[in-house]
Image (spheres, coloured by chain):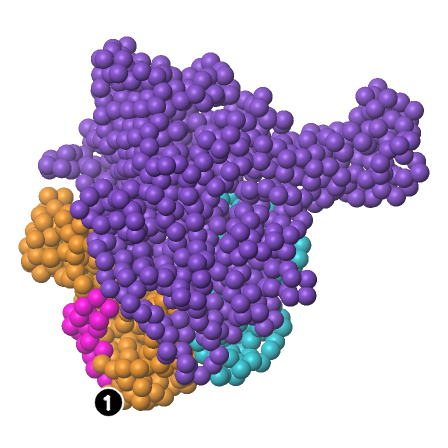
Chain colours: A orange, B cyan, C purple
């Protein structure tokens, strides 16, 4: 369990990184924290011929530009906890961060790394889909801005082209105060979710003005709950309504069935966790 | 081969390193340090935790070439041959180890944690301590003695500050 | 003046081995580095069952660096053989490298050596194994299906062995029963997962014709014997060293083909050879455990007395029989221990070992007892429910109270505290039982309390192995105690310590017998050159047999010290006591001689010895276990809280009341119990080695094979009752495995209590608990 041979390149600038990635195409991979890529390499499930180390690039900024919060690809997970802009505008994101891996992984794992790895049960891809994030990818050919809903194509497959890498994730800052929560169920703390649900609510009292719900672990990519979101609009959020929203969401997905969890169980969890997450989001108002 | 300068437990050497060599392997073979253990080589068990510029990191998920110019510390640097570090002593008195294989990883994960808690004057709950070690697997102790050792190392120092 | 003689046995002595483990200087197998060493990587079968057409190594010819490659054709008939010498047994033989057929995923097919482990791994990838698939045997039903061809040539079926055990009149029990309760139970396949994988280093030195083998093993002498027999070398020319061993748990308590092969390769290549198992190999191909299916039928009187028990036991033991406990080990053990701590005198068991295209099964902490006790203790709860009795009351009604007790199979139980343990746990859990009752009708949160009461046969002696007719053959443990001229002591111990703290506990035992400080006792173990022949550390025998042997050998030296002291103090040796580093007149401690002085006289200034006394202070003792062993007992209890809508289980409390006789060191005993319990919790909730229909293993990394992590666990509460056994010189019973035996049944009983359903299978994963609570949600289950 040691990696196959590769060539190592430390990029001093984004331009250099992109030109190296362009040169290597399919055979090149950027490496940041390495928390997802290196295990795959050690198991020889991934064998890039060139690694482009992007750790020294200045891609670790969290900044607000107008109505957008931009997070650099190299922002490490543990920073989400100390970022007032996330706490204020993206409570579901903050809530989700608690479920990511273990302390050492949170310290080194990066936002760009997690979403490029695109594990179907990971928290951050789900958060991106939940918040209608835009994934900013760059290559020597320029920048592409990809909506999260189009970025995740399948399990471990993204819209990134060879030579392209994620440089930032942009989250639209909501106009009005939003309430959010994220809950997941995993066999053990820190494991990838069997099901994880994120919810964002805009409320007037108990009445839902706008709702967004997304799920990790059900399908090969994070999924949104269009019908449940629509259903919630204008309704007073009660336990019953939340349950019903969960039912609607569960009916709209086609959960995977694997040796760990059956599709029925996943579907059931979607109902329960959607309902709980909505109630948790609402209670966070207090 | 990539020229790489590493400082391991204060010893600086410049080596020609093949990029794919894991930091854990280079520390073990080139610096003859035995306190870095490889338990899974895929980033789950925490046995190989070392400090890079003071921060815990899994040396099985790190390539040595990535550490050019960095300071790396292993368990050997904590309390020397006599294991004098307060956490090592607490592991001993609370039976926080049996076979010892995972122990360096736990110590390197926990040493900065204990230091931070003591600096903040906080006594974490058992639940918090258990979360702090959720990236380390121990197969012998059932974690009981490890949690007790962390409690003891922190409380001893907090009491020492008050005295 | 009274000489100080604090008793070391029973003292909470901090471990002497800890400093080197904490400081990082301890040397494990991968720290054995020899110049000019070749590194071995195996090319292993990726197919579960197939006929080998070709092992193509031609790609290595122009790889650009030196490699050495060996396949099944190159190694003659070297193999692992592990036969139970009974007529029913069908023999299997595993070539060290597969020759004609591969029988499980992970079976070694080619050995590839290079001068660097990265390079040997690259090279091993280039070996192409061409196989013609054969039908796989993947389930117990398939193994018993006569239409599926046997996986070994010349076999009549896929049953390694099927036998019976019986005692008493089961027909009468059946006839007199007011209740007949029948249930089927299933425990999953697991593996033991020491944090250090296995590894072997071997070096042959032609000068003195000495083969030295380092192996991460629990049984260095047995490794030596097997290598000697297989490679036809004198045992006197083989030295096996177990360096620091990073956990074993029984997994490293067998002799493995790699140990023999690495030794052979070192001789063949005339260079040191090193093999370090990687985690994937460890999970799929080291050794597996459990995988039991039991059907039990209990016959119970109107008054709630157990009259008899019928059992049918199947174990999927994988593709090959393992050395030295064989394919018959697990099923035989399950059948033997099934009667447990209860008083009844009619029993009949049929037990069988079934072959499959999976990794061979071997010993792992508890060996069959976790499964046997699971079935036994689940059944006790089911019977209690059926006859309307409280489960603890029902157990108390049937528990053995008088000792020695001869059980239905003729095994004699030495004194224990079975009833007291149950009473004690009932007292400890009173509030939890009440709290659980409160949640009985909740559709949200349920609390449940469950317990498992069990005994564990430990430290069994040679007759037990003779009866089994398996190649382990014997059960004694030897210790050689040598006092040095300065009064310090070296013990050569036939056990091998891999976390149990034997360097401390054995020193405590010796210190008591010799009247010295345990810090002055240095325990050497794990090296066949410095330790007397013994079968190693397994079977919960280190404390009682190692401790007993050290005690008895030390007494021989104590006796000699007393004789020298008596001579010089002009007293009688019966009047001399040892303590506080002195030999003194018992009635007048002011008259003494330091033991250090006596030691110097015995070894150097021998002119001061009594006339005719032979110089030297060395004694050896080999202590065999009692015929039927000595029986530890324990009750484990779990309190669980279940979030019904999601199936999430929280272990709120885990309590152990245990009795292992004399406690040598409470720190170590508690550690062994707690560590065992958490492994048992792993069996109950998380750990599952899963294969698909083609016998491809699915849980091949730590992302899939889930072990307990700290956040999932409560603090484990341990209470002791001490009933020293008369069968052991220091009163100790074994305890290393017991912790792992009780958790699965205790937790399953707690889940059953919480949800009001039968819980007949493990692991109790999220999905499993959710399925078990269907009736609460109003769904058909």
In the image shown, does C514 or C654 lie closer to the viewer? C514
User: Subunit of mark 1?
Assistant: A
Is residue B160 something that shows in the picture?
no
The quadrant in which residue B125 appears is top left
Residue at 38%, 39% in the rendered image: C328
Residue stretch in magenta? A143-160
Residue C557 placement, left or right of A255: right
Residue at which label 1 appears: A141
In the picture shown, does residue C293 fall above or below B61?
above
- Which is more toward the observer, C192 or B92? C192
Q: Is residue C319 above or below residue A114?
A: above
Q: Does the magenta stretch include residue B93?
A: no
| Residue C603 occupies quadrant | top right
Residue visible at 28% across and 77% down in the picture: A166
Q: Which residue is drawn at 79% across and 44% down?
A: C484
| Looking at the image, residue C643 lies above or below residue A26 | above
Q: How far across and how far down the image is residue C633, in percent?
A: 46, 26
């Amino acid at each position: 369990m040691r990696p196959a041979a590769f060539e190592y390149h430390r990029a001093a600038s984004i331009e250099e990184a992109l030109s190296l990635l362009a040169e290597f195409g399919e055979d090149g991979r950027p490496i940041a924290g390495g928390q997802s890529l290196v295990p795959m390499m050690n198991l020889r499930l991934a064998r890039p011929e060139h690694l482009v180390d992007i750790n020294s690039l200045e891609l670790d900024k969290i900044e607000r530009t107008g109505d957008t919060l931009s997070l650099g690809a190299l922002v490490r997970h543990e920073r989400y906890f100390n970022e007032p802009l996330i706490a204020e505008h993206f409570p579901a994101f903050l809530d989700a961060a608690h479920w990511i891996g273990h302390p050492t992984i949170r310290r080194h794992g990066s936002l760009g790394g997690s979403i490029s790895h695109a594990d179907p049960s990971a928290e951050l891809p789900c958060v991106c889909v939940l918040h209608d994030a835009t994934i900013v990818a760059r290559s020597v050919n320029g920048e592409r801005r990809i909506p999260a809903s189009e970025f995740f194509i399948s399990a471990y497959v993204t819209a990134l082209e060879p030579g392209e890498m994620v440089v930032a994730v942009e989250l639209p800052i909501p106009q009005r105060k939003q309430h959010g929560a994220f809950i997941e169920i995993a066999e053990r703390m820190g494991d990838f979710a069997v099901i994880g649900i994120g919810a964002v609510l805009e409320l007037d009292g108990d009445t839902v003005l706008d709702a967004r719900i997304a799920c990790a672990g059900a399908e090969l990519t994070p999924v949104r709950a269009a019908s449940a979101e629509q259903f919630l609009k204008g309704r007073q959020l009660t336990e019953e309504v939340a349950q019903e929203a969960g039912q609607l969401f569960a009916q709209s997905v086609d959960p995977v069935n694997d040796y760990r969890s059956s599709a029925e169980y996943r579907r059931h969890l979607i109902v329960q966790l959607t309902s709980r997450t909505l109630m948790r989001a609402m209670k966070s108002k207090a | 081969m990539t020229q790489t300068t590493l400082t391991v437990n204060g010893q600086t050497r410049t080596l020609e390193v093949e990029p794919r060599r894991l930091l854990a392997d280079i520390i073990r073979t080139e610096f003859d340090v035995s306190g870095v253990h490889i338990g899974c080589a895929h980033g789950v068990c925490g046995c190989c935790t070392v400090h890079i510029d003071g921060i815990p990191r899994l040396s099985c998920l790190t390539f040595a070439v990535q550490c050019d110019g960095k300071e790396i510390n292993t368990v050997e640097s904590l309390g020397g041959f006599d294991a004098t570090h307060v956490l090592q002593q607490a592991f001993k008195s609370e039976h926080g180890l049996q076979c010892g294989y995972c122990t360096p990883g736990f110590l390197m994960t926990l040493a900065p944690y204990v230091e931070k808690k003591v600096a903040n004057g906080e006594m974490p709950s058992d639940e918090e301590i258990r979360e702090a070690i959720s990236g380390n697997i121990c197969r012998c102790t059932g974690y009981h003695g490890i949690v007790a050792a962390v409690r003891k190392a922190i409380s001893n120092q907090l009491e020492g500050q008050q005295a | 003046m009274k000489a100080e003689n604090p008793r070391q046995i029973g003292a909470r002595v901090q471990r002497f081995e800890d400093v080197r483990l904490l400081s990082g200087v301890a040397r494990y197998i991968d720290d054995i580095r020899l110049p000019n060493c070749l590194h071995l990587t195996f090319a292993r079968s990726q197919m579960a069952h197939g006929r080998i057409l070709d092992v193509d190594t031609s790609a290595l010819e122009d790889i650009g660096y030196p490699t050495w490659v060996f396949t099944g054709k190159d190694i003659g008939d070297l193999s692992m053989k592990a036969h139970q010498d009974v007529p029913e047994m069908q023999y299997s033989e595993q070539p060290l490298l597969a020759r004609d057929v591969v029988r499980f995923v992970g079976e070694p097919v080619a050995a590839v050596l290079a001068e660097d482990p990265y390079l040997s791994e690259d090279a091993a990838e280039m070996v192409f194994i061409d196989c013609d698939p054969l039908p796989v045997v993947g389930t117990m039903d398939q193994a018993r299906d006569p239409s599926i061809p046997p996986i070994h040539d010349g076999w009549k079926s896929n049953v390694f062995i099927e036998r019976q055990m019986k005692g008493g009149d089961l027909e009468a029990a059946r006839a007199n029963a007011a209740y007949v309760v029948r249930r089927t139970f299933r425990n999953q396949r697991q593996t033991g997962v020491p944090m250090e994988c296995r590894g072997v280093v071997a070096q042959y030195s032609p000068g003195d014709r000495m083969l030295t083998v380092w192996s991460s093993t629990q049984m260095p002498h047995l490794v030596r014997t097997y290598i000697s027999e297989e490679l036809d070398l004198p045992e006197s020319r083989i030295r096996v060293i177990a360096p620091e061993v990073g956990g074993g748990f029984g997994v490293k308590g067998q002799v493995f083909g790699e140990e023999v092969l690495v030794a052979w390769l070192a001789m063949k290549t005339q260079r040191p050879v090193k093999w370090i198992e990687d985690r994937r190999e460890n999970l799929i191909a080291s050794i597996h455990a459990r995988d039991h299916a039991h059907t039990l039928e209990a016959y119970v009187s109107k008054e709630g007395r157990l009259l008899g028990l019928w059992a049918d036991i199947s174990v999927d033991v994988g593709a090959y029989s393992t050395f030295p406990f064989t394919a018959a080990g697990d099923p035989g053990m399950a059948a033997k221990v099934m009667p447990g701590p209860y008083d009844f005198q009619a029993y009949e068991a049929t037990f069988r070992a079934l072959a499959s295209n999976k990794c061979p099964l071997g010993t792992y902490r508890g060996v069959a007892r976790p499964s046997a006790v699971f079935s036994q203790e689940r059944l006790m709860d089911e019977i209690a429910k059926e006859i309307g009795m409280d489960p603890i009351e029902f157990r108390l009604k049937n528990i053995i109270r008088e000792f020695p007790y001869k059980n239905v199979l003729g095994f004699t139980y030495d004194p224990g505290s079975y009833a007291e343990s149950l009473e004690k746990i009932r007292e400890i859990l009173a509030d939890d039982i009440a709290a659980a009752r409160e949640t009985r009708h909740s559709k949200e949160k349920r609390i449940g309390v469950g317990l498992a009461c069990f005994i564990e046969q430990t430290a069994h002696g040679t007759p037990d192995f003779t009866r089994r007719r398996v190649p382990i053959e014997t059960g004694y443990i030897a210790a050689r105690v040598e006092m040095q001229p300065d009064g310090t002591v070296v013990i050569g111990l036939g056990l091998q310590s891999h976390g149990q703290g034997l360097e401390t506990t054995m020193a405590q035992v010796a210190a008591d017998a010799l009247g010295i400080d345990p810090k002055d006792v240095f325990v050497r173990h794990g090296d066949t050159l410095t330790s007397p022949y013994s079968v190693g550390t397994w079977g919960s025998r280190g404390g009682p047999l190692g401790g007993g042997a050290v005690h008895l050998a030390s007494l021989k030296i104590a006796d000699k010290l007393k004789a020298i002291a008596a001579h010089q103090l002009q007293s009688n040796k019966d009047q001399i006591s040892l303590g506080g580093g002195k030999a003194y007149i018992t009635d007048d401690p002011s008259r003494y001689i330091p033991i250090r002085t006596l030691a110097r006289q015995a070894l150097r200034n021998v002119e001061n010895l009594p006339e005719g006394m032979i110089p030297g202070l060395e004694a050896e003792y080999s202590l065999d276990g009692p015929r039927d062993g000595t029986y530890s007992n324990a009750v484990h209890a779990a309190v669980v809280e279940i979030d019904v809508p999601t199936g999430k289980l929280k272990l709120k409390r885990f309590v152990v009341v245990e009795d292992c006789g004399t406690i040598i060191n409470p720190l170590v005993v508690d550690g062994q119990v707690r560590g065992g319990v958490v492994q048992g919790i792993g069996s109950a909730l998380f750990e599952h080695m899963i294969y698909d229909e083609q016998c491809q293993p699915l849980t091949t990394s730590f992302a899939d094979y889930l072990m307990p992590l700290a956040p999932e666990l409560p603090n484990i509460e341990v209470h002791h009752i001490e009933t020293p056994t008369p069968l052991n010189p220091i009163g100790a019973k074994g305890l290393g495995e017991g912790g792992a035996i009780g958790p699965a049944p205790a937790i399953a009983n707690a889940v059953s209590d919480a949800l009001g359903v039968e819980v007949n299978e493990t692991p109790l994963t999220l999905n499993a608990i959710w399925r078990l609570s269907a009736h609460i949600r109003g769904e058909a289950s």
